[in-house]
Image (cartoon, rainbow, N blue to C red):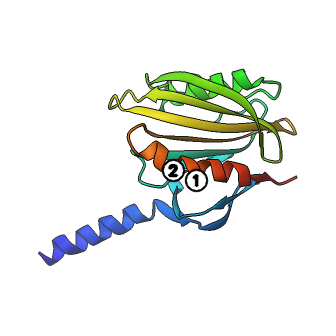
């Protein structure tokens, strides 16, 4: 019995090391700073050269990706799917519709679906940017998700945050926080 309890404690401690709390307050993601009103969890295994992923309620329930300074010719992130097939890379001259298509290619690489609902200009990261609202159906469990993304291209680099969560409860629960974070986000000049 003692060995079982010790083993369980060891496993739980290992899982906890995959996450670290973020907020409330100011948080830095590479070249970006964002104000967070509640505690989120940074998934430490998600960090890439230009981004990272956070979750409020757990990875299957929601995720918030930050892409900070994706340079011309770089991938957004490496995934299991990028090892199987080549996904497009960011190009500095992309129009907003092309950036959304780039994001779509990463979301659908595993066979999930993507439907763009709205694309509109907004101020993001202290400059001209855009917001895109979308829906996706995750292939692995057929769960319907809603998503919102905010992006800007500054100094030939892409800065973007993309949030997805199930349409039932979780998306609406955190949408106000996401919109607040997007308004607060600044990019180091």
- Give the residue at the far bottom of this rendering: 2
Q: Residues within 10 Å of mark 1 (few under 14, many from 20)?
A: some
9 or 130: nearer the eye?
130
Q: Residue at x 46, y 59 (%)?
A: 18
Name the residue carrying label 1. Answer: 177
Distance between the Cα atoms at labels 1 and 2? 5 Å
Q: Is residue 153 left or right of residue 25?
A: right
State whether residue 121 is above or below residue 180.
Answer: above
Q: Is residue 186 left or right of residue 78?
A: right
Q: Position of residue 120 (x, y in %)?
A: 71, 29
- Give the residue at the far left of this rendering: 1
Q: Which mark is residue 81?
A: none
Element carrying mark 1? helix
Name the image quarter holding residue 144: top left
Q: Position of residue 183 (x, y in %)?
A: 72, 50
Q: Residue at x 32, y 66 (%)?
A: 12
State whether residue 6 is above or below residue 120.
Answer: below
State whether residue 27 is above or below residue 62.
Answer: below
Q: Residue at x 32, y 32 (%)?
A: 141
Report if the CB atoms under discs 1 and 2 are less than 8 Å apart. Answer: yes
Q: Position of residue 54 (x, y in %)?
A: 53, 52
Q: Position of residue 65 (x, y in %)?
A: 58, 44
State whether residue 100 is above or below residue 70.
Answer: above
Element carrying mark 2? helix
Observer able to see residue 66: yes
112 or 50: nearer the eye?
112
Q: Can you say which quadrant of the picture contains the N terminus?
A: bottom left
Q: Which mark is residue 174?
A: 2
80 or 36: nearer the eye?
36
Q: Is residue 180 left or right of residue 107?
A: right
Q: How many numbered callouts?
A: 2
């Amino acid at each position: 019995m003692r060995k079982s309890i010790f083993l369980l404690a060891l496993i739980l401690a290992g899982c906890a090391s995959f996450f670290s709390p973020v907020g409330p307050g100011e948080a830095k993601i590479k070249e970006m700073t964002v104000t967070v009103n509640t505690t989120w969890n940074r998934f430490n295994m998600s960090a890439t050269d230009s981004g990272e992923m956070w979750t409020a309620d757990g990875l299957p329930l929601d995720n918030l990706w930050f892409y900070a300074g994706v340079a011309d010719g770089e991938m957004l992130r490496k995934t299991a799917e990028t090892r199987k097939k080549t996904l497009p890379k960011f190009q500095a001259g992309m129009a907003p519709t092309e950036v959304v298509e780039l994001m779509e290619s990463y979301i659908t690489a595993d066979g999930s679906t993507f439907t763009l609902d709205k694309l509109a200009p907004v101020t993001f990261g202290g400059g001209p940017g855009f917001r895109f609202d979308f829906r996706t159906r995750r292939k692995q469990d057929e769960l319907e998700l809603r998503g919102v993304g905010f992006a800007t291209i500054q100094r030939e680099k892409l800065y973007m945050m993309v949030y997805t969560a199930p349409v039932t409860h979780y998306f609406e629960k955190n949408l106000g926080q996401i919109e607040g974070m997007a308004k607060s986000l600044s990019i180091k000049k």
